[in-house]
Structure formats: structure tokens, C-alpha cells
Amino acid sequence: MARITSLSEAIAGTVNDGDTVALEGFTHLIPHAACHEIIRQGRKELTLVRMTPDLVYDQMIGMGCVKKLVFSWGGNPGVGSLHRFRDAVENGWPHKLEIEEHSHAAMANAYEAGASGLPCAIFRGYIGGDLPKVNAKIKRVTCPFTGEELAAIPSHRPDVAVIHAQRADRAGNVMIEGVLGVQKEAVLASKRSVVTVEEIVDELPERSLNAVVLPHWTVGHVVEVPGGAFPSYAQGYYPRNNSFYKAWDDIAKDRDSFHAWMKTNVLDKGPDAFAQYARKHKAAAE
Amino acid sequence: MANYKPTEMMTIAAARLLKNDDICFVGIGQPSAACNLARLTHAPDITLIYESGTLATKPTVLPLSIGDGELCDTALTTVSVPEMFRYWLQGGRIKVGFLGGAQIDKFANLNTTVVGPYDKPKVRLPGGGGAPEIATSCGEIFIIMAQGKRSFVDKLDFVTSIGHVSGGDSRQKLGVKTKGPTKLITDLAIFAPDPQTKEMIVVSIHPGVTREQVQENTGWPVKFAVKVDETPAPTARELEVLRELHARTNRAHAAA
């Protein structure tokens, strides 16, 4: 049942040391503000799940919050490497990072299977490549009807899903528009959830009959954090800040400049720091 | 002296291979540039699909990331990522998939995972993303990659996605029914699989490029088709449309 609350309360009440956490978002609606709050609260030993670990996971890995990463593509899209992720895998800094590596199809199927209450996901994939050799969770099953060999992996059942969406109403019904990624599946697959939103409104706006809405009784904490997806974007609110993604390459390349940025922009700040981005772009759009 | 860059020739050569009725799974970077160049020139009705779920998208600028708002704003519809991979890709609805990588071998298998050993990599690359299933589920695959000895290698450090595996009928023997890589477009030449051995052989060389240059930038002994064409040079229109697309994109990305 949804509880409308503050970000610090939401994270403190859901994310524990050692939990498996999925902060999802596929380019769009990436929960940056919630990630920063997890870092501020000093969570440790997390297993992070995500199809496309990007800046938020780079930040959590660099700050030493992460024990293990379950993922399918870990880069800064269109820019290059995630330097903190690479430093952890290549040099064990700040400490060793376990990885469990999949393909996108596998990850998407595993979330869907988790949301469906199934123990595993079955799909046609992982044929011929080396990933099954380095990930013991990738198995083959035989279709009982046709004999076709298919791939199977365990479903994702995170302890906590953390997502960002455009709007929720006061009951906590959450509406998502645009590139949807796997956020709906991640929330339904997880035991607990935190949803940050651009706005909490009296009534969800006029919408398509098939709008994507997570009913209030399927979500946990709902928190209004305007601008909370910046520098990713919120369709209808503000565009992706591609310049920041390019700038991150230099910030994260060096351990000291990374730490300096994290101190100034995360450790010494609160969720309110994101509001300037929401206002700025909204004003620009008017 | 040519009035275009080798990478422009590569993008244009790839764009020309696309047809108006193609349904393409598009990756970020070179594939996205080639597919949109095709759409803005000879293939206005081509269906472009990005793995973020955007179906039949017509971006005015190239996306920096696979799920930019521009793709969603100009799409016919946007579906969830599980639906994209299940109904559209696995369902066999994509005719052409584009791939690239850090390393390729002579059978067009690709590595986008690690340079060096998996457990102690010299370079940890982003990983496979959609590639392992794109490689086997799309009707055919076009690969775009600039040539060099570090990327065109005799043996991959890791096989992220398969091409023609170990040649011959080894791909079909794995139960894969799709064609696999039918074209490899580089900044120097175009390769296609030999009908029997499935090794990628040179079928066309870009203007001003020699066979020696192709060999110098390939880590295995290159084979050439009996008849090797010269790739037609870019036309003025192709260059103009491509450069305008990049200029618009750079302006948009600098502004955001």
C-alpha cells in the first residue's frame, strides 16, 4: 500500500545493507535523486540489478556501496566507459566487485518472470556465445512440446525496486509515460519499492485508456522529487542533459575528481538540489 | 584527394544497403547514422526500431543514447523493453539488425565484453546488451566497424555474439535459422561471407584504398572475392544529408 513520504524516510525504510536493489530506467526516468540518498545513507554490500548500469551505478560502485552487479550493458551511452565500474572490475577499487553478466533479452525476461511470480524465465537466446561459460545461472531447457532447446535463467526478485515516474496521485497511483523500460516489471517483481515522481497531483491527468499505471496497492513509498531524474530526462518535463553525460567522462576518470564531485553534489546536498533542473526546463518549455 | 572522410564512406556504404521496406533494429552510433541517412535519402519509409521500445521512429537528430526522448517523440508507438525483446525481436519481426564491436574475427563473431581474460580483464568493455539475441533473431545482420589490427583479430578474447561461428554450417548446427552477418562494412571495404566457408571476404573496396591497406588493417590473411568491385564514391547529396544530420545532432546535444 502506497505511503507518501520523504526521500530519506523512504530509503531508510526500504533499503538495508546487503539487499538486492534494482534502480531501473532505460535512458529515461533514471532515479538519480534516490541513488544519491542511498549513497548519503551509507548503504553497503548491495547487490545491484540493472539492464543498463549507467551514472547512478558508477556513483554507487565508486562510493563503495556495491558488492555485486547483475547487468547486461555497463557503459555511458554514446560517450564511452563507466570509469568507476571499470576501476572496480579491472583494479578492485574501492574494493572487488562481483559480476553476474547477462544479455538484455535475459534481463528483460527475468524481470517479467519475477513480476509474473515465476521462478525462471525462458526464452530463445544465448546461442553459441561465451556468456553461458562465465555465468553459471544460464542454463538450457527443452520445450516439452517441440523439443526445442531454450535458455533459462532465474527470475529477478529484488528486495527493493527504485524507480522515477512523472506523476502520482494522492492515493499513490503512479503513472509512467514515454520510454517505459522495465520499471513496471521491476516494481511488481520486488518485495518493496520506492517511486520518486516529478509531481503528486490531486487527480492523474486525462490519459489514454491504456495508460501505464501502477495501482497504489502495488507500490511502497511514493516521494515527490521534482527534477529527480536529472541528468536523465522525464518526458513532458525536461530533456536529457547530454552535456552532463559527456562531462561525467572526465569527472569519473580520476578517483580524486570523482570524490570531489560526489562530496559537493551528493554528500553535502539533499534531494532539494534536484528541483532547480525541474523548474529550469519547465520554464524554458513554457 | 577525396573530399570526404573514410568514416563518411563507411556510413554511406552501409546506408545504401538498406531498402525502403526494411525493418531495422538500430544501435547507437554508426548504425544509427547509417539507418537515418537511408531514411533521409533513398528509403523514406524504412522502419527503424531502437531497443528502448520505440517502433517506427523518425528522429530529426541522432540520439546520444538508445532511449532519448527524440526517439519516443517521433515514434509510431513505444512499447516496454520486455515486449520489445519478446514480441518484436524474438518473435522474428526484424529483418535487419545492426551490430558493431570492439573485436571481430574472420567469421564475423563479435566481442564487446572484455579485452584480456574475463576474470582479470585488461579492458572491461560495456558488455553484450542486446547483441547476443540480435545476432541470432534478426533475419540478417549488417556489421559496421572501422578496421584496425587491434579490432580485426585472429582470435577473439570473448565471443559476445555469434556470426558464422567456426564457418561452414556451424551456425545452422547450433539450431539458428537466421542468416547471420551478410555484410561487414568498414572504412576501407565491404566484406561478405564466402558461400561455402562463411569466412568474410572482401567484395568491394572503397575508392583510393588498396588491397594492401585492407590487409595491413586486418589481423588474419584477407581473402578477396574473384570479382572485387570499387565502392561508388559518396554523392554530393549523400554527403550533404549526412553532414547536415551530424551538424543538427551536435547543435542539439550541445544545447541540452
Image (spheres, coloured by chain):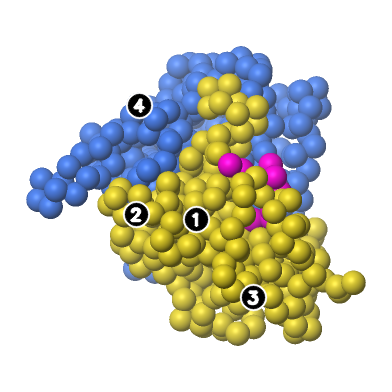
Chain colours: A blue, B yellow
What residue is shown at x 60% (from left), y 63% (from top)?
Answer: B224
Q: Does the stretch in magenta take in A195?
A: no
Name the amino acid type tagged 3: Asp
Q: Dot 1: within a 10 Å radius of its alpha carbon, few (fewer than 14), some, or many (20 or more) residues?
A: many
- Tell me whether the residue at label 3 lies in contact with that at label 4, contact meaning CB atoms closer than 8 angstroms: no
To which chain does the residue with label 1 belong?
B
What residue is shown at x 78% (from left), y 79% (from top)?
Answer: B240
On whether disc 3 and disc 4 are found on a single subunit, the reply is: no
| Residue A284 visible | no
Q: Report the quarter where the N terminus of chain A lies.
A: top left
Percent x, y of residue A282 = 69, 59
Name the amino acid type tagged 1: Glu
What residue is shown at x 68% (from left), y 75% (from top)?
Answer: B231
Question: What numbered label is drawn on residue B169?
Answer: 2
Q: Report the quarter where the C terminus of chain A lies.
A: bottom right
**Between disc 2 and disc 3, whose residue precedes?**
2
